[in-house]
């Protein structure tokens, strides 16, 4: 009965921990995953208490950290950085609540005995766990209703990510020895000093996390400012292009009239192609500036590919007829996939006679977003092998790109990639449900 009660409380404890982390890191709460997460951690903790702790008690915390990181990553579907950061946050909070729990007990019984020894006997251990659950529940309710979130941008650089992680780990290192000292000397420490220490540690913890997140947000804002500068520069180029086109409009009409008067159809075709080349950038950047301006990562990616296409004299056509909110795939993964596919398309088009690439983004009747990349090519690509790791038809290439695309797409059940090849065109079609 004792073991059942302890494991039941431990299970509830992990449920609250998981729910707290999902809310703090702004993740969708999936109760099936949450129950699995709690069950796995409860079983591991029971195993540690029954087997491992008897041989080496110090290994308990180490195994707990490893299991927590793995379960947060693979069951709750966090990224590695998020899983490490979440585990560090949980360790700090748990240590702080352990401190508060022992202080509450010490205050309740007037500090007449060793709280640490008292708390490790049955049924007193159940009381300590209930206090811990109540404290965690109070924190979870506060986070849920106050909508406190930790938002680490997906495209944040590694240096900043590691600094946030290091900050949380350092906080844990500073707090845990302090708590261990209190647990071993609780009878000899004044309760007023304990309360002050708890308050000071809590404020330090909040300030540490707050500064980390604010510095991250500041970096993101800085990059947004840089993007806005680039966006304004692009708009200026579009306006200048339109002014130039308007200025030359009469001249162009007269030139076309001259070809028609002389019935020089071949000359008219050549002039039309030259005119089309001059207006291509305006035709492409207008839909970008109108429909993709709220997605800096995708906007920057497409602008860079447009510049490359102009440099290589590739006819690159962009068809985007509306502003689409692409939220069902991480923007980092989407840009990585589109970057690889567009690079391949542009490189293949350069080697072909037509030098043609077309990108279109639209919605179908099922409200799915369709991204289609079409390009001309030379040679004979093998549609069955192009996604194999290491397969390539280009000298000096690793053949890793399309294999990476397939790997990313396979992570999402709502995404699919279809490849089709005709005699002159190669098509990659991404469908996001």
Image (cartoon, rainbow, N blue to C red):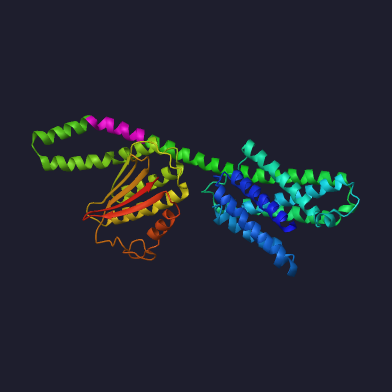
Q: Identify the residue at image location x=47%, y=47%.
A: 330
Q: Identify the residue at image location x=74%, y=51%.
A: 129
**Which quadrant holds the C terminus?**
top left
Q: How many marks?
A: 0
Residue in the foreground of this view, choosing between 313 and 294: 294
Residue in the foreground of this view, choosing between 198 and 121: 121
Rendering coords of residue 406 (x, y %)? 40, 57
Q: Residue furthest bottom?
A: 55
**Which quadrant holds the N terminus?**
bottom right
Is 274 part of what is drawn in magenta?
A: no
Q: Identify the residue at image location x=54%, y=51%.
A: 157
Residue in the foreground of this view, choosing between 88 and 218: 88
Is 245 part of what is drawn in magenta?
A: yes
Rendering coords of residue 207 (x, y %)? 70, 43
**In this orientation, does residue 366 appear?**
yes
In the displayed structure image, the side of residue 15 where residue 307 appears, left or right: left
Magenta span: predominant SS is helix
Rendering coords of residue 38 (x, y %)? 62, 53
Q: Which residues are magenta?
A: 238-249
In the displayed structure image, the side of residue 382 where residue 214 appears, left or right: right
Rendering coords of residue 410 (x, y %)? 42, 55
**In this orientation, does residue 162 appear?**
no
């Amino acid at each position: 009965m004792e073991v059942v009660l302890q494991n039941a409380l431990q299970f509830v404890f992990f449920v609250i921990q998981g729910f707290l982390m999902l809310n703090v890191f702004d993740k969708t709460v999936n109760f099936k995953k949450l129950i699995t997460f709690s069950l796995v951690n409860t079983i591991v903790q029971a195993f540690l208490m029954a087997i491992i702790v008897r041989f080496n008690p110090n290994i308990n915390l180490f195994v707990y950290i490893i299991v927590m990181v793995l379960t947060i990553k693979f069951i709750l579907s966090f990224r590695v950085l998020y899983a490490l950061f979440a585990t560090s946050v949980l360790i700090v909070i748990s240590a702080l609540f352990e401190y508060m729990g022992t202080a509450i007990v010490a205050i309740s019984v007037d500090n007449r005995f060793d709280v640490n020894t008292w708390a490790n006997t049955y049924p007193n251990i159940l009381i300590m766990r209930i206090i811990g659950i109540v404290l965690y529940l109070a924190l979870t309710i506060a986070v849920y209703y106050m909508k406190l979130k930790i938002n680490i941008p997906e495209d944040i650089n590694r240096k900043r990510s590691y600094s946030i992680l290091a900050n949380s780990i350092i906080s844990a290192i500073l707090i845990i020895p302090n708590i261990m000292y209190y647990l071993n000397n609780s009878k000899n420490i004044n309760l007023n000093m304990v309360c002050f220490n708890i308050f000071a540690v809590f404020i330090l913890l909040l300030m540490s996390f707050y500064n980390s997140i604010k510095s991250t947000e500041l970096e993101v804002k800085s990059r947004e400012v840089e993007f806005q500068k680039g966006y304004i520069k692009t708009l200026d180029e579009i306006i200048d292009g339109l002014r130039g086109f308007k200025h030359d409009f009469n001249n162009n009409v007269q030139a076309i009239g001259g070809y028609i008067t002389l019935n020089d159809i071949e000359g008219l075709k050549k002039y039309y192609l030259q005119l089309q080349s001059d207006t291509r950038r305006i035709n492409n950047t207008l839909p970008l500036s109108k429909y993709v301006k709220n997605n800096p990562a995708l906007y920057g990616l497409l602008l860079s590919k447009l510049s490359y296409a102009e440099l290589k004299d590739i006819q690159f056509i962009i068809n985007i007829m509306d502003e689409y909110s692409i939220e069902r795939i991480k923007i980092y993964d989407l840009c990585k996939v589109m970057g690889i596919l567009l690079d391949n398309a542009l490189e293949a088009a350069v080697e072909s006679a037509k030098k043609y690439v077309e990108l279109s983004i639209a919605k179908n009747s099922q409200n799915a977003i369709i991204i289609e990349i079409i390009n001309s090519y030379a040679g004979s690509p093998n549609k069955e092998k192009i996604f194999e790791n290491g397969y390539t038809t280009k000298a000096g290439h690793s053949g890793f790109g399309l294999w990476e695309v397939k790997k990313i797409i396979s992570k999402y059940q709502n995404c699919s990639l279809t490849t089709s090849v005709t005699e002159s065109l190669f098509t990659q079609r991404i469908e996001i449900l």
